[in-house]
Every structure is written in structure tokens, then in C-alpha cells.
Amino acid sequence: MGACLKTILVRFWLIVGIIAMTLDPLSAAAHPREANSTTIQVVASLAGYSKKDIKIGFVISPSRLSDETFQVYKENHRLATGALEYTGITWGKHVYKITFTSIQKTGNSFTLRSNGASSSPFPIQANVWEQYLDEMTAFYRVQRANVDTQSALPPNYTNTPLSAKGYHQAGHLDDAASPDRTQHYDLTGGWYDAGDYGKYGGNQWVGGMIALSYLRHANAKEVQFDHDHNGTPDLLDEAKVGALYAMKFVDTFGGAVYNIANNAGFDHPEKTTDNIVGTADDRTIGELSIGGSAKAAGMLAATARAFHKAKVDPSFADAAAQRAVIAYNYAYVNQLQNEGSYEAIGGLPNSLLWAEVELYLLTKEQIYKDRAISRINELTKEDLRATNYWDLRPLSLVEFYPEASLVQKVRIRLLLRSRVEYFISMADDTPYGVLDEFTNFGVNEAHMSYIGDLMRYYELFQDPSVLRAAKKGVYWIYGANPWNISWVSGIGANSVKYLHTRLDEQAYDHALAGITIPGALVSGPNIKDTKDKYSVSPWYEDRPLWQDDAQQWRYNEYSISIQVNLLYTMVALAATNSNPQGTGITPMQLPITSPQIGDFVAGDVRVFVQPQGYPLSLTADEEPMQWKNGSYYADVPIDTSQPFAFHRIMVHGTSMLGVDSYSAMHVNTAPDLPAPGSSLLYDDFSGNGTWGAVSLGWPNWYNQDGGTGSFEQTSVDARDVGVFSQRPASESSLAKFEPWKDTVNASGYRYMEVRVKNLSNTNIQARFYAEGGSGYEFSGGYISIPTSWTTLRFDLDQFPGLDKSNIHITLWLKAGTAPGSIAIDNIAYTNENGGGQPTLTQLSVEPKTGTENTNFQFSTTYTDPDNDKPFAVQIIIDGVLHDMVEASASDTNYRDGKLYVYATKLVPGSHRYAIRTADTSTPVVLTPQQEWPQVYPSIGSLLTPPSAETHIESAPTPADDTTHDSELLTMDAGVSAADE
């Protein structure tokens, strides 16, 4: 291709604006189902706001708005107008903050409106949180094991009713047998841990948190609610449920606590056993949990304290206190044994500290205090996380603080403050106030765990910035999020419907729509869609189980541990019910400007941060970041061994006042381009591969003409393998195995290779079948499997209708008349070498310097001696991959060179790029790094957006308002520093 033609094409490309056409298969644009919505959203807390609360919502738009105003309505009466506060682009959308703290009217039908869009209605009440406390305890009543729901949840207990199909009879009345079934133990009671029917030692602390939610606010009328009218506050009723279950372990095993695992599918609990002691379906005790014993000790002590404080059921309180000591002694004596489920950070000492603190507060015995102080003295701020089964130390420190010496109080406050600074600075990564710790399991449990800690910190130290951060985090949970959904079942105009629970026996029925379990908080957004590795980040969808029968638990799971910090926070907010003035100490923001969440990366990633004034480091090893062109930057090596794996990059800075700030970014390892030598591993049965890394196995999905099938991961001939077995009922019996409903994008690959061995003495046969647009017999029917390791190769190009981007594999076994098994140790997609390798030449970027407002145009010429079209031409800018586009679709001659281009804006910093390509039949081509362009901050980027203002308007006053128009007209309409 001549230079003149190339110049013409480049100019033409710039004129027509291909910058808007980056049809990148690594981006949402290549996946219309995930493409950003063109709809403007207005979102708010669907649970509402208390009259004195800071009140915020958001307008979320695919583009900048020309009208940057909002209105507050009560029913159809406009109460106020205000200016939106532009916060920038978050997760691909323009986000504007609405602050309407000045609104002091009360009622049930408020909305926020802007640009023709409206939020769902929400209430404002004098104390809105108090009205949801019944849902918080109702959730645990529904989770009570071995009790029929009608008894646990009396009629009209809560104004959010449990779905009719959620009611069930008592089940698991035959818990539990010894592993060898020679003995039976009465271990009925407690709560089912999650949406299944397991009960686990590692969550024995939960009842203690419920007891403390009462105890820490025992003088507030809000915690005294007794909706079952039994004379005991409902919070104490629930704490007693957890305590009685733990006491059975103490009485039976001298303090040892064991798991009792789930044994059921989507059936009500009474259908999973016959409820008769001594029969074959009795569940057995499982893993020993020494940590569960320590957690149970602290829980029993906290519960005893709460009952003593309430002067309710003193004999029970004394019994719980006695057994707390026994459980603690068992854990202390056996602390060198395996901790068991769920493990805490730092091991058993973590849970022992919780037990020692609660026992000291209960008994005032010095030995517990001395042991607790010894453990506290060893802690550093790097040791702490958030209060949950994984770390009880923040809760323990808060509990111990009033009893500590002055020196110890200073130390404890610094430790607790470090976690507060961590959360607030991580939550300011986005306008939504959510903890920036997205993973392949929903963010809400970790998020609420920190919020519970923030509430306890506020109770001790009255820092207004901490209370505001906690409230903002609660608003995220209840609907002030880009999905405009309340993740608490039954609360709000649009709450989660498709909870992952076996109480919904009809979860697979396409005609039925979800279930309501009052107050159940689900795990929420993931880093990626469980069914689409190329999806947007973060991702969430409230979809039925039948649309995702493998991993719905990752985003719509609930559990007693996910829930308990929400319960504590709701009780604390109801009891506190204030919005104190003042700013408090707030960490500075550390905006990571590149990469962006969900970016696909290859090799080293250059991270750019634009802080507000102090040096930064990467938190992995506290390596200092460098400063250039108005940004701090550092190169982070990314492990490329596992395609689609996500990586969390975090930066840290400390101000001159000693305040820590953190920010995080999540990126994904890009798959290799399809080429010889860069196969796509699907499953090696050792935890690797696009399916293997999911660790869900290959269930026996179906058996035809009788018989059974089974799958297990094990070792054969020193190889990690999957063993597929069939026990036929007749010669015509068939067993079907599937990797759930997983699909793989094998675009660009020609072969599927399976390394397999017959482990039987029989002529077992296998059929490899695939769905990808239609059904395809990869193996051409049933084929005999050799008794030595053999690699089967199936040519995908023999099936021209096959959609390689969406292949779902199934395996069928036919063992004949005797049981048989095969082992597979590798499934991968491959290519073989052939032809001449392409080249990439004439790399260019124009201009080579600019600001963040400059459009940078990258180009290269792809040449292939065999005239093979590239699978892709990808530019790697600072480690982030983007697909380049052809400058001329009509140019199909690759022998004389074809121009590929890409245009983008870049953040301030010193950038670099490389380009890679492959024609699928020769090795990948990767150019050397180019150290351009240099980007400098513009003057405009240093300006701070103006603060929002709210202007109150006169409006008719409905009868249920508690504030008069005259008060609204004379109040300060501005937004104070405390409101921001």
C-alpha cells in the first residue's frame, strides 16, 4: 500500500469519526445484551430516609446532560428544585449527585425527577429505619431450623409478608448422627446458614451480634419491639435461638462444634428427611470447627450479658454463661488443632479474642482481660478487615474499648480508625459510597460488614463523617445504585425477586416470579456476569434461577452472616436517628484514572493516579509510585496464566496528618489470541481453565434407560483428572454429563482436544456432543475409549454451522452391561501451524503529545504473505487491550498491507503502547513497546465542579406532613460541608 493512499485513508478515518466505532470484542459494544442503556435513570434509597438524615440520590446518564437540574416531588406536588452535582464518568456512565437534605416533609410517596426521568417512590419519615426492624428479625425467624414457619413467624408479624410458598413444615428433626451412624445426637435448632439447609460452626458468632444490637442500645425504645408478644424483645428471642443451638454442642461434646451440611435440592426442609431419628436419611455431623467453639463462646457470653441487662429469663442467661466458659476452654485447649469452617483471618486467635473480650465483660475475671490485652497488643492495622466470620477483631476491639486503659484506648482507636479510613477512601472511588472490593462473589456482604463497623465506631467516637459514610453505604444497598434495585427482599418499590433459596421449590418454573423473604439481603454485584466472561464490570442482574442454574448463589445468595451487619446497622440507625453537623476527618481521594474496572489486560499494566497532594505506593509491597505529567504511575505485572481471571490493583497514600487513603481497580486477564502454541484451556481438572477455574465440576445431568452416573475430581497416574462413571441398568443405559450450562468462546480455534483414558475392563464408549447454534456430534457418535492415555482431536471446521463463540459441551457414556469409568485430564482448544507469519509495520501515533482532551490516533499496517485476514489486530495501551479497526472495509488485499487504526483520549501521564495480531495458523506477532504519547493535564482538569444547591418551592401540604411550608421557605437551602 502506498504512503499517499495510507495518508488519505487516515484522514478519511478521522473525518468520519471512527473514534466512536471501537467495535472491540473485549468491550460491551460487542455484546448488545450488555451494552450501556440509553435511558436516563434517577435513583434513590427505596427504603427512604429519616427526616434528619443526609439525603442523596443520583442521575445516571449515557451522555452529558444539558439540563443539570432536578426536582423533588411529593406525589404530584413539586417541593423543590436544585442543581445537579456532576461527579464524572463511573462504570461507563455520567453520574450526577442529588443532595436534598433540606427536605424535611414526611410521607410515603416522594420522587426525584430530572430530564423527564423519575425515581421510584420512597418514604421520608421521622424515623424511617424503625419501621424495618421487624423485617430484620423476620429474616432470622424464617431461617430457624427444625421449626415450622407458621410457629416461627406469626401472622402479621411483619408488614412485609413472606411469600406463601416460603412457608414450610418443621424439617431436620432427626439432626444428627455420628459419621458412622452408630450414635445419634440431638442437634436440632439454630438457623439454616443460607439459602440451603446447612448449619456451620464458623457462623456461631452471629447470635452474639444480634444480642449486641440490643445490648448496645438497650436504653432506646426502638430496640424493645416485641411483635410476637411473648414478653421478650424480639432481638433477644433471636439471640436465644442461636445460643440454644450452641448449648447443645456444649452439652453433647463438651464444647466441640461441628458442621451439619446441606443434603437437599430445591425442596422444603421437611421433604429432605423423614424426621425420624435413627433412619438412613439422618444428616451426620461433619467437619469439626474449633473456631466455631471459640465463636460460640463469645456468642453465648454476649447473649447472657444481653439477657442480664434486660432482666429477662435469668435462668437461661446463667445457663448460657456457664456454657460459654466450657466452649471457650475447649477452644483454648485445642487451639493447635485445625480451625475448621469458616476460617478467620489470622487463625484461631482471631476468634479467641472475641470470646475472651465477651467473657471478661460478662464475668470481669482478670484472666480473660489479660489474654485479650496480650492479643490486642500484637495487632497492627494491616491485621484488621471488617467484622464477619472472617474477622471478629474489629467488633472485639469496640467491645473492649470502654474497659481499656488510656494507653490501650489510644491504640484501639488508631486500629479502628485505620479500617474507617480504608472504607471511606475505598467507598469514594465511586459516587455511590460502595466498598470497591468487587470479586466473583457479590460485594454486599463485605460492604455491609464495614458499615456495621462504621456504626459501632460512630457510637464510640461520634465522628459525623463516619455516620454519613455509613448512611450513604446503606442507601447503596436500598436502591441508590445503577441497577435501581433494593437488594433487601421486600423493602422498597423495586426489591430483589429471585433469591437463591431452596425455600423456593418452584425456582425452576418459568411461569413463576421469585419469592419474598422479609429482610433478606443478597450478595449483589459481581465483577463479571457468571455466564459471560466478556460482560461489563461490575455486573448484576436479578434473573430467575432457571436462567443461571450454576452460579446464582454468587449474586443472589443470602445468609445469616450476610444479613447480620445489616440488622445491627438498622437497629443502630433507628436508635441514633440523627444527622450531626461538622465535617470530621475524611481521607483524601486517590482517583485511579487508568485502567478502568473490567478492562482486559495483557502483561504489565501501567496504573495512573491523580491524587490531591501526597506520594503514593502500590499496596502489594508498598512500592513507591513515580510522578510524571501530573500523575503518579507504576507498572503492575499481571499473571496471564489464567484467562479471564480478575486482578485487584490497589494504591495507598498517607497525608501529612497521618490519614490513610486507598483506591482500587479491578482488571481481567485477556485470553491469548488463537494461534499455534497458545491454546485455550477449558478444564484441566486441577482448578485451571475457563471452566475448571470455576470449580463446579461436571454433574451427571441425566440418565436414559435407567442406571446412574457420577463424577469426581481425583488423581490417576499422577495426573489431576475428572473421572466420569456409569453404573448401567441395561445395555441401553446412557449417562449424560455437563459443565452445568457453561459455554466457551472458542472463536479462532480449529480443534478441540481431549486427553482421555478408559479405567475399566469393559469397552466403555463416549460421545462428545456440542451445542453452538445447533447440535453437533464432535465424535461422530459413540466411540470406544482406549485403556492408555490418548488425545482425541475433533476438527471444529467440519461443522460449518457451529457457533464457535458459544459452545456448550456435553459428554455421554455408554458402559454396556457392567459399570465403567473414564478419566479426562485435559480439554483444550488448539490450532496447528501452517503458512507464513504476518507482520505489523509503520506503527504511528499522532499527535505524540497532548492533554486529556486530545484525540490520539494510532495506526499500523498489517501484512500477510498468504493473504490471511487477521483474527484481530489489538493495540495494548498501558497494558489494556483494544481492538483496532480496518481503515477500509473494501481493501481485502493483505499481501500488500492493510491499515488498521484506533483513536482514543488518554489520561495525563507518560504512556506506552504495543500492537499484537494473529492469523490463527502462525504464532502471535507482538511489536516492541513504543514510549508514546505524553499527555499533560489541561487547566480545565484542575477545576472543581460547583457545589449543588437546593431551592425550596411552595407547595400544598398534605395532611400527613409534619413540617409546614413556612418552615421550608425560611430554611437554609444551601448544601453545607456536612451534607457533602
Image (cartoon, rainbow, N blue to C red):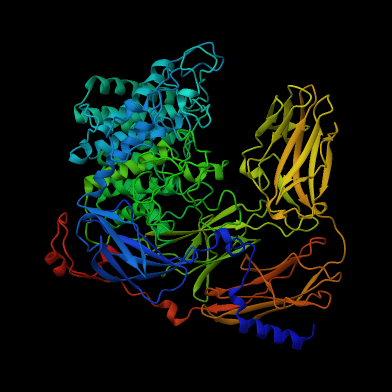
Q: What residue lies at 71% left-to-right and 58% top-to-bottom?
A: 672
How far across and how far down the image is residue 621, in percent? 54, 55
Q: Is residue 515 above or below residue 53?
A: above
Q: Quadrant of residue 536?
A: bottom right
Between residue 558 and residue 363, name the one nearer to us.
Answer: 558
Q: Quadrant of residue 912?
A: bottom right
Q: Is residue 700 above or below residue 461?
A: above
How far across and how far down the image is residue 850, in percent? 55, 82
Looking at this rendering, what residue extends furthest in the bottom direction?
Answer: 4
Quadrant showing the C terminus: bottom left
How far across and how far down the image is residue 276, in percent? 47, 14
Q: Is residue 58 above or below residue 459?
A: below
Left/right placement of residue 259 relative to residue 671 reads left
What is the count of numbered marks?
Answer: 0
Q: Is residue 843 visible?
A: yes
Between residue 655 and residue 229, name the one nearer to us.
Answer: 229
How far across and how far down the image is residue 659, in percent? 37, 59
Q: Quadrant of residue 568?
A: top left
Left/right placement of residue 326 relative to residue 620 reads left
